[in-house]
Amino acid sequence: MAPSFSAAAFLGKSCRVEFVTSVFKTSQLPAPEYPEIAFAGRSNVGKSSLINKLVNRRGLVKVSAQPGKTQSLNFFMVEESVYLVDLPGYGFAKVPRKVKNDWQGLITSYLEKRENLRCVVVIVDLRHGAKNQDLELVAWLKLMEQPLLLVYTKADKLSRNQRGSQAAALDDGFGVSRDERVIFSAKTGEGMAELLAGLDRYLDIS
């Protein structure tokens, strides 16, 4: 049984973290012995930067200018207690249709069947309205009763008034309350405390 883990105690500061494996098919998934938090979002939405900020490592997850470069489920172990799982980005990635279909099958199977998956962090660019694929993912996760936490990234790109109006529009689109999402900036660290508190709601395994 995995030990108790507190996101607020370890993430957002120096912690033991290591890359474990890249999964291209479900048979390669690690044994489900640790709780997992998955991170999903459109390509170039700031997913890699968010995970790097969480573990306080600048280059642990590679930030690429080429959408769609992540083509596997990438597992990172934190404090030998919890996995952070970086899912392939979706949206405008310029990759062959077969690759996209493979991603979809792998991601769908993982999200539907992974018994130790505690929460899916759905990352959305605060500067833009919700895209159809974002809306579909959130609706699907709700339908499956899979816990999710919405994170609106790149807050530093907007003024405080703009952040409020954009966040309210996204809330309406996703059908969530302010308590069900976090406004975040990987550059400034804004929203880190709220993000950690949100993760701890799903990692309370003591």
Image (tube, rainbow, N blue to C red):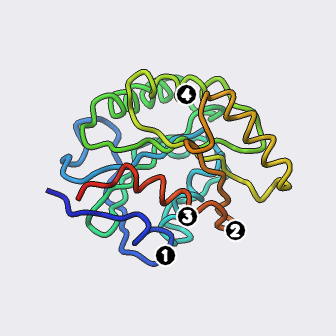
Marks 3/2: CA distance? 12 Å
N-terminal of the pair, mark 2 or mark 4, is 4
Mark 3: amino acid: Ala
In the picture, measured across the screen, residue 6 lies left or right of residue 148, that is: left
Residue to which mark 1 is pinned? 13
Residue to which mark 3 is pinned? 193
Q: How many marks?
A: 4
Marks 2/4: CA distance? 36 Å
Numbered circle sitting on residue 96: 4
SS for dot 1: loop
Q: Label 1 crowding class (10 Å Cα cut-off): few <14, some 14-19, many 20+? A: few
N-terminal of the pair, mark 2 or mark 1, is 1
Marks 2/1: CA distance? 14 Å
Residue to which mark 2 is pinned? 188
Mark 4: amino acid: Pro
N-terminal of the pair, mark 1 or mark 4, is 1
N-terminal of the pair, mark 3 or mark 2, is 2
Q: Position of residue 164 (x, y in %)?
A: 78, 46
Quadrant location, the N terminus: bottom left
Quadrant of the rendered structure where residue 19 is?
A: bottom left
CB within 8 Å, label 1 to label 4 = no
Q: Label 4 crowding class (10 Å Cα cut-off): few <14, some 14-19, many 20+? A: few
Q: Position of residue 97 (x, y in %)?
A: 53, 23
Marks 3/4: CA distance? 39 Å
Numbered circle sitting on residue 60: none
Name the residue rendered at 50%, 70% in the picture: 12
Q: Position of residue 48 (x, y in %)?
A: 56, 55
Mark 1: amino acid: Lys
Q: Note whether 112 is above or below 201 in the view shown.
A: above
Foreground mark, 1 or 3, reads: 3
